[in-house]
Image: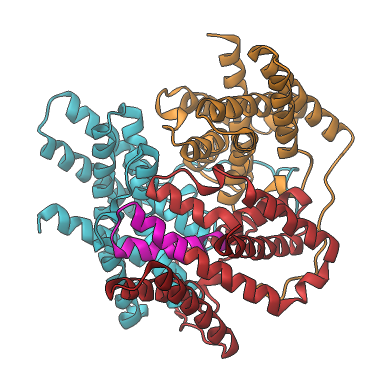
Chain colours: A orange, B cyan, C red
Amino acid sequence: MTFITILDYIGTFAFAISGIRLASAKHFDWFGAYVIGLVTAVGGGTLRDLLLGCTPFWMTQPSYLIVTGFALIAVLILGDKVIHMHNTIFIFDAIGLALFTVVGIEKSNAAGFPMFVGIIMGTLTGAAGGVFRDTLINEEPLIFRKDIYAIACILGGFVYYLCDFIGLHTALTGTATAVTVILIRIIAVKYHISLPTLKGEESKNTDK
Amino acid sequence: MTFITILDYIGTFAFAISGIRLASAKHFDWFGAYVIGLVTAVGGGTLRDLLLGCTPFWMTQPSYLIVTGFALIAVLILGDKVIHMHNTIFIFDAIGLALFTVVGIEKSNAAGFPMFVGIIMGTLTGAAGGVFRDTLINEEPLIFRKDIYAIACILGGFVYYLCDFIGLHTALTGTATAVTVILIRIIAVKYHISLPTLKGEESKNTDK
Amino acid sequence: MTFITILDYIGTFAFAISGIRLASAKHFDWFGAYVIGLVTAVGGGTLRDLLLGCTPFWMTQPSYLIVTGFALIAVLILGDKVIHMHNTIFIFDAIGLALFTVVGIEKSNAAGFPMFVGIIMGTLTGAAGGVFRDTLINEEPLIFRKDIYAIACILGGFVYYLCDFIGLHTALTGTATAVTVILIRIIAVKYHISLPTLKGEESKNTDK
């Protein structure tokens, strides 16, 4: 098992935990919690693969389903203790976000798409699973209102293509991208940095 | 018209009815009700076909659109009487769930995917349409909180591969799978069997 | 830049504005508003391309991302003034709906699908982006309850295949279709024409 594979499992585990915790707050059953965990972990990569015209990555090996199973077991055994492991989960989540961004960009490049598609695919791989999670549990997507999250993937994407442009080795390019994503996440959360919000009047078109 | 085709139409009709009823409770217009009915009936199989890389099944013949039209007409004519036909609709729905599970597994096998993908595709074909339905009408998906529903597809999937492993004829394997799904649904509803739910504290991350 | 391209950008701009306005009413941040605008503008065509088995159209040229960026800037600079430009936005939106319908039908025909698929693809291209928008901002889809909107695409689709059947030139067929969609939209809004709604009793199945 390579170092990248270990990081991949850590990220999958952290993403699944975030889905299972929110499903738990909604009192979903075990099956529902598992599905929400799985969608959070593999949803972004699945959308990426459908857009790129590839077979979804989790359909060729079951490890993502198994890691999500371990995440469910962890929440069942540890219960609310998991919620209090804030910092560990935050770092795991940042590692996942960083790695998924790099994987998304590289898969887009391998399929022959230009830079702007690569940055979108990196961002979707990292951030779209959380949007599916929030849609399924019937909440407004968190990343559209809070923190710098998807923006970390986008900035990481620019770092990727910059390193690539100046001719850095692939491994170095990937590492620089991942470190960028993780650092931006740490700085954004530590200093409560958010994007400005739009403050429109209530639209008259809404039907409530 | 073969026996399987008749079962397929019965299942499609029952799934469409479930969508149209819920759209009706939300006071959607006829078009909205039709779309919700159609998404409930063909949404799961469409997701399956996109994941497997096939052309969605309803794009090669219009019968699913027509059956959904009949379901809308039935609700328009019979109105609340349809709601009181509980048992008939329940059995039709269970037949649909069972047949869709078998179809999903067989399509996955035909595309060359392993057992764990087949069980997921069977479950998606049976249960994902209802999740799309609930998301579109802005409710939490029912199957994540109530009853044994998707679990019936999963257990049916294990029965399928068990029968396949011991060398049963395809028709027998399919029948055993379908009977398993229907029986589990009947037992689960009759004896109010549900999965345990997760009881997490309210997550502090939610933004309300 | 051809006349069609200009219409395409006008439609994209209007669709993006509608998404950004609703995101603004929900106090999303700039990134969230941009994503909602983009999904509204390109979501329908993306679903169409996935169903048809093509590469999503925006992945081969970045202009749709750029037009959406201009829409965000317009809302940021003009603020609530945009909301009061009702009539201009309405006409732009109708132009987008009309053009997207024609594009969807032609792409379906080019992929070799029959008439009923073409009408669905035209309707999805025009109307599905708004459904994704409403799902992401956690509202019931507007087009399932209000106005004649998707129905304009469907009727436009029938006009398309009628013109095609009597042997009209492609450009004339497209124009007749687009004019039909725009006229139906204007008439529906001017005379407050809606489809009848379904008035079911509250379903006992819902879990609230």
In the displayed structure image, the side of residue B177 where residue C76 appears, left or right? right
In the image, residue A32 above or below residue B142 = above
Indicate whether residue C116 is drawn in magenta.
yes
Residue range corresponding to the magenta coloring = C102-130
The residue most toward the right is A191
The residue drawn where x is 47% and y is 24% is A66
Q: Is residue A81 visible?
A: no
Indicate whether residue A63 is drawn in magenta.
no
Residue C50: % across, % down: 43, 47
In the displayed structure image, the side of residue B136 where residue B94 appears, left or right? left
Closer to us: B66 or A16:
B66
Residue C156: % across, % down: 42, 74
In the image, residue B140 above or below residue A92 = below
The residue drawn where x is 76% and y is 29% is A86
Number of callouts: 0
Residue A151: % across, % down: 74, 38
What secondary structure predominates along the stretch shown in magenta?
helix
The residue drawn where x is 35% and y is 80% is B76
Closer to us: C34 or C162:
C162
In the image, residue A49 above or below residue B14 = above
Q: Is residue B201 visible?
A: yes
Give the quadrant of residue A192: top right
Closer to us: C82 or B153:
C82
In the image, residue B112 above or below residue C61 = above
The residue drawn where x is 57% and y is 37% is A40
Quadrant (top left, top right, bottom left, bottom right) of the C terminus of chain A: bottom right
Give the quadrant of residue A197: bottom right
Residue B45: % across, % down: 34, 49
